[in-house]
Image (cartoon, grey):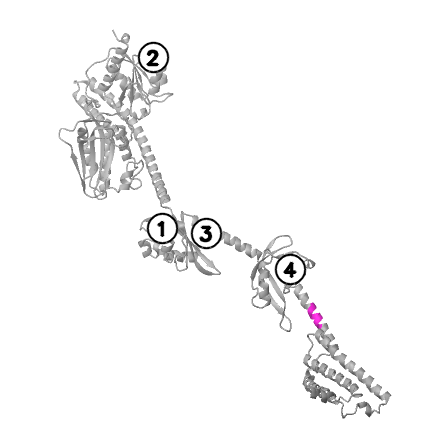
Amino acid sequence: MSELVRWMFDPAGLTPHGFCLLWEPWLIWTHALSNIAIGLAYFSIPWALLWFAQRRRDLVFKPVLWMFAAFIFLCGAGHWLDLLTLWVPAYGAEGVIKAATALVSVVTAMALWPLMPRALALPSPSLMQASNKALRESEARHRANFVGAPVPLHILDAEGRIVEVSDRWLDLLGYSRMEVIGRLVDEFQEDGGVATRAALPAVFSAAAEFRDTPRRLIRRDGAVLDVLVSSRLERAPDGMPTHLITALVDVTARKRAETALAESERSFRLLVEGVADYAIYMLNPNGIVTTWNPGAERIKGYSALEIIGQHVSRFYTEEDSATGAAERALQIATKEGRYDSEGWRLRKDGSRFWASVVVDAIWENGVLIGFAKVTRDITQQREVAEALEITRAQLAQAQKMEAIGQLTGGIAHDFNNMLQAMTGNLELIRRRVGEEQFDVARLAGNALEAGAKAAGLTSQLLSIARRQRLDPRPLDPADVITGMRDLLARAVGERIMLHTDVPEGGIGLCLADVSQLESALLNLVINARDAIGGAAGNIVISLHPERIEATPGGWPQDGDYVRIAVSDDGPGMPEDVRRRAFEPFFTTKGPGKGTGLGLAQIHGFSHQSGGTAVIESAPGKGTQVAILLPRTTRPVRLTPEPSFATADTEAGSSETVLVVEDDPLVRTALVETLRDLRYRVVAAADADAALALLGSGVAADLILTDLSMPGSMDGLDFAAVARMRFQKLPVILTTGHAGDLSNRLLPTEMIIVRKPYSRGEIMSAVTASLARSHDQHPALAPA
């Protein structure tokens, strides 16, 4: 090292450069001062270049600049060594510096020439000015385009501060530009920008991005907006990220619509899932079940796991499936948009129910995506509707029968009046001609017999019309069955055999209204005949005693009963029909073939008589209907049948009878008959005329009045008024049918005589009524 230094600075053997200048002062100082000045200049230029390079980081050709600075610095060093060698011969150091200068200059020259084309390509100041102007104009256009963009935009720096916003952004949030520039975007977000702050570093490092990212922004008025955020990272020419351009899409309305739709779907789902009375489910275009609500599970019995994925035809009956009913329903719904019908459907357990079905085709953008199906179990409604229709038909039939009954009762009443006039006059004729004109008397007797048969016919008509009062009396049921056998045999026809099972000698007496019992037997036999239909069969009427013990319902009461049963070998009744057989208006017969009141009347008649009625039946085993009537030990009370035989007893004692009868033929015959029986008779055509007679002083011992009369009052009302004014007068009522007395209270001592009555019946009634009056009022008895 010391050798190098000595070589560089050892002056031994060398002459300073000033010696060459002969130490001429002005030359010495000229060189010295010039080298000093040049060296200082050369030293300052590199420092200026270094300072400039530090300030201009975008400086191009920077390595050449460093070599050029080194070259100038070495040149300055060479000049200062020239200054030194004026007095000190340090030519070694000067040579080193010059060698270094030569090296740097050669390298700089070598590096400079290849860069010349690029250097020549650098814009000139004028071009730079033009470029800057164009750049400023481009930036202005870019800013104008950004600010006027039709979508909300903002630019963020790396810290999340807002650098610029578009006018649409300001309109969306309601701020002015001065209010937002420079503020953190966090201040405008509902969550305080937590999510954005957490994501910004990753976004600026290009590790993440905002792509339709949901955010909630706060407007200046406090309203909250739902937006989707999408961003693009902007970079400098050196690739460094500079800012983030962000676009906002306002989805508030869509979000609210989605929320409303979701809520609507939720409500609809809850509604569908909460409906238990309707099966609501979806089908795909092929009829496969895709959804299932609880109502469907309740109605059809399948769980969702069991039925989803199955074809809708599973719910159809075999006969409907065989005809392709399920597929046809979907085809109609596809073609017409909707299909609705009613029919039988199957539950999981195989039971059937009557269903109301609606199928709607669901379309989306013209493509069939499936079907909505609603099924409702309307079995009960159908039964109610059918029952209502049956009831209407039964009511119409009952009204028809009631009208027929009223017509029959009216005809019977009028017919009885005509019979009364005929038989009354025939009896008078027969009595007056006596044995002197035997042929006339015989013919009159024949006519009276015909009248008796006609009276029996009207009695039957009244029974059918239910115009008879219930008159329970002790009777022998064996006699009733035996007496009706011929009539019942004719009623069942030739193909059905009628048998009777009645113990010899009978089983004792029962308490019942004979006409009602006869009607009940006839009704039961006709029902049995209709049950057998047109086929051959057997009907058995049986009579047996029966002992009834205590029953849970307490009816009938404990005791001995007579069981009158009508059995057939017809098809029998199902249990549901058997249970309802006694219900009013219930019938299994077709429209117009039955009122459904027959068994109900029998049931009511048996209960009114103190007994009951029961049905035993099963499909394929025939039917037996039994009437149980209470047995009695009371003697049979014989009721004289209408008899038109000669009554020879002369019962009258000149008592005065007031006859009130509106029919002149009947009135004339009755007056003649009473006079023939030695009674004084006063006649009136109506109640008002009769009251006028009584008020004028007519002293009547007995009133004999018809029940049905024109005028202000009928016979029963007239009797009540007469007995109120003349308390001791006995009254006899005559009537063509007892339906006029329904629901009316009769005095216990009043005698009722049914038309047509015979001379003997009217004589017995008058005699009995006068005798009872004389017993109660002896002072009125004739002397």
Q: What residue did someone put label 1 on?
A: 300
Dot 3 or dot 2, earlier in sequence: 3
At 54% from the left edge and 55% from the top edge, which residue is drawn?
257
**In this rendering, the label closer to the viewer, 4 or 1:** 4
| Residue 343 left/right relative to 217 | left
x and y, in percent, of residue 204 in the image: 60, 67
Q: Specify the label residue 269 is tagged with.
A: 3
- Quarter-of-image position of residue 19: bottom right
Q: Is residue 436 above or below residue 93?
A: above
- In this orientation, which residue lies closer to the viewer: 519 or 656? 519
Residue 121 visible at all: no
Q: Secondary structure at mark 1?
A: helix
What residue is disc 4 on?
A: 184
Q: Dot 2 corresponds to which residue?
A: 726
Under mark 1, the amino acid is: Lys
Q: Earlier in the sequence, mark 4 or mark 1?
A: 4
Disc 2 residue type (three-letter): Phe
Label 3 environment density (alpha carbons within 10 Å; few <14, some 14–19, many ≥20): few
The answer to whether residue 462 is left or right of residue 205 is left
Q: Which three-letter amino acid code belongs to the residue tagged 3?
A: Arg
Q: Residue furthest left?
A: 504
- For label 4, the SS is loop
The residues tagged by marks 3 and 4 sit, at their Cα atoms, a distance apart of 44 Å
**Residue 310, x across and y down, in percent:** 36, 57
Give the label, 3 or 2, closer to the camera.
3
